[in-house]
Image (cartoon, helix red, strand yellow):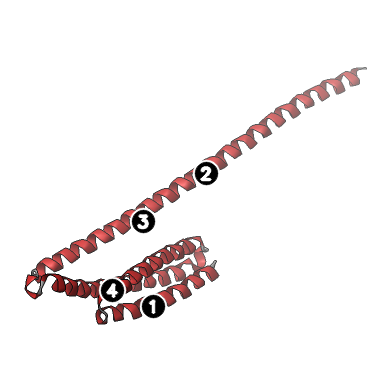
């Protein structure tokens, strides 16, 4: 399993390097090329999120003895992911400022405090959405686990009932055997 985690680590490194490169290029580009690059980075960030989920699942399945080491590595990757998202958000803001200025003109800007407040609220909403998604995923996994446990309990119950029936049958056969042997001894 750790080999799967290491493969995910390599993919993570490759993707984050590509994303960092593209984030640095976003402010320097213009027009349709910039729009395409923003969409591409957004898609790659989603791939990294999915990769992080896979890594998290792999870590959960590792033996307890080595799990801590992998959890700390995963935690540092999550920190790196958050930094990438903040950098991307900053480059998008610069991009959206340029688009707004092109459409509305230079004098149509809003106050910096309002924009900062809106950005904070947007970030809070995104974090809340991710938490809700994670909670939903945990609920789904818990439900699946519960279904598996119920299926196992049902199978175990059937085995116990079959064993009990065999035991009763064996007990009845022993009773018959005992009566036959007793009858033979009397003769």
Q: Which residue is mark 3?
A: 134
Q: CA distance from mark 1 to mark 3?
A: 26 Å
Judged by depth in the image, the label closer to the viewer, 3 or 4, is: 4
Q: Which residue is mark 2?
A: 149
Front-lying residue, 184 or 158 = 158
Label 4 close to label 1 by CB (< 8 Å): no
Position in image of residue 159 (x %, y %): 64, 37
Of mark 4 and mark 1, the one earlier in the sequence is 1
Local SS, label 1: helix
Of mark 2 and mark 4, the one earlier in the sequence is 4
Of mark 2 and mark 3, the one earlier in the sequence is 3
Image quarter (top left, top right, bottom left or bottom right) of the N terminus: bottom right
Q: Residue at x 90, y 20 (%)?
A: 184
Position in image of residue 88 (x %, y %): 28, 73
Q: Residue at x 21, y 62 (%)?
A: 122
Label 1 close to label 3 by CB (< 8 Å): no
Q: Which residue is mark 1?
A: 18
């Amino acid at each position: 399993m750790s080999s799967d985690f290491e493969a995910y680590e390599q993919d993570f490194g490759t993707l984050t390097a590509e994303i960092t490169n593209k984030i640095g290029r976003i402010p320097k580009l213009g027009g349709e090329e910039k729009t395409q690059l923003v969409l591409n980075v957004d898609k790659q960030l989603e791939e990294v999120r999915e990769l992080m989920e896979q890594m998290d699942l792999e870590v959960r399945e590792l033996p307890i003895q080595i799990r801590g080491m992998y959890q700390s590595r995963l935690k540092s990757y999550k920190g790196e992911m958050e930094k990438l998202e903040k950098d991307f958000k900053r480059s998008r803001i610069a991009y959206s400022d340029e688009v707004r200025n092109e459409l509305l003109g230079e004098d149509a800007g809003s106050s910096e405090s309002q924009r900062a407040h809106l950005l904070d609220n947007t970030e809070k909403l995104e974090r809340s959405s991710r938490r809700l998604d994670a909670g939903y995923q945990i609920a789904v996994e818990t439900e699946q686990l519960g279904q598996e446990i119920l299926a196992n309990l049902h199978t175990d119950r059937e085995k116990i009932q079959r064993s009990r029936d065999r035991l009763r049958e064996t007990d009845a056969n022993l009773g018959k055997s005992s009566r036959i042997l007793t009858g033979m001894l009397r003769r």
